[in-house]
Structure formats: structure tokens, C-alpha cells
Image: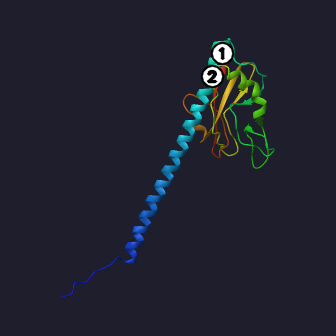
Amino acid sequence: MAKSTRGFTIVELLIVIVVIGILASITIVSYNGIQKRARNAARLVQMTTWRDMFELYRAENGTYPAMASNTGYCLGKNFPKGPDNQSRCRDYEWLGMPVTSYKESDSTALMTALSTVATLPGGPYVPVNGTVGPYADYYDDSIEIIGVFDGDADDCPATTTYEWDDELGSLLCAIILDR
């Protein structure tokens, strides 16, 4: 008697394909979440490194670097170029139009001052929806080191203060230094 062989039915093949699709979707979502957390962790490390540089400068000089109040400065070099082809931080681009941003070149005096106490941290500086950091906002009574994160209002790291979010995935968190 001849032995008969039986293959997979269309229904069985479709079930296997659907299961593989579901598993692939779960894997992709998990991977994207891991990437987001890794980028945010790197951004927090950048911010705390800048905070440490400001504190080291103050320890060696008795005060933070003197800069004009009520303005901002890019922390680092090689930020993305805005529509005017100048390296910028903060909102270097929003829907193709420049808005509130700081020119990297205007931060030279601050970078020179901080480089007297340590080697300046490097990038990469990856934008989140057209906003890139870190940058520092100088006020009369404080300096805010601002980091740009992926997330919403509840996602600022524990060592930072919530500043702003655009409800589209850009989140600004700050480390505040009292002057």
C-alpha cells in the first residue's frame, strides 16, 4: 500500500504567516522603544556632563562663565545647519522655517571659557522634530541646561525639570543651576 503525504493547507499557511507578522510587529515596536530610550539616555549623559563642566568652572573661578542674561547658547560644536546654512541649536528648523534658535558661532566665548577646565563633550546632536540640544539659557538668577528628548511631559529624567513639550514627541527638560 502506498503511503500518502499531506502538505499544508492554505488556512494553515495563512495562520503561520499571521503569527509571524504579529511577532515581527512586536519585535519592531520593542526595538524602536529601545532605540528611543538609548538616545534619551545619551542626551541625559550629555546634559549632566555639561552641568559638571559648569560646576567645575565655578569651583575653579568662583562663578559660572559670565555671559549675557536672557539669551541662549549652544553647548557643543557641529550642530545641524538651519535653512540659512549656519549651525544652530534649539529650534533650528520648524516646518522648514527658522524660529527661535541660537547660532553655534555665538557660543564661542562660552565654549572657550568652559574648555579652560575640561575637554568639551561632543555630539552627535540628533534633532527631535526640528529641535536640537543641549543648549543653555542664561537668566539673571539661573542658568538652565536644556536637553531635547523623545517623549511627552511625563518622560523627563528624574534629575531634570520639565520645561515644555510639543505633544508631537519633542520634550524639553532642564537642569537648573542657581547663580
Dot 2 corresponds to which residue? Answer: 118
Q: Quadrant of residue 112?
A: top right
Front in this rendered view, residue 162 or 98 = 98
What crowding class fits label 1: few (fewer than 14 Cα within 10 Å), some (14-19), or many (20 or more)?
some
Residue 146: % across, % down: 66, 31
- Residue type, mark 2 in image: Ala
The C terminus lies in which quarter of the figure? top right
- Residue type, mark 1 in image: Arg
Residue 6: % across, % down: 30, 80
Dot 1 corresponds to which residue? Answer: 58
Residue at the image position 61 percent from the left and 30 percent from the top? 47
Outermost residue to the bottom: 1
Residue 32: % across, % down: 53, 49
Q: Quadrant of residue 171?
A: top right
Residue at the image position 46 percent from the left and 63 percent from the top? 21
* Up/down of 156 relative to 27, above or below: above
* Up/down of 159 relative to 8, above or below: above
Number of numbered callouts drawn: 2
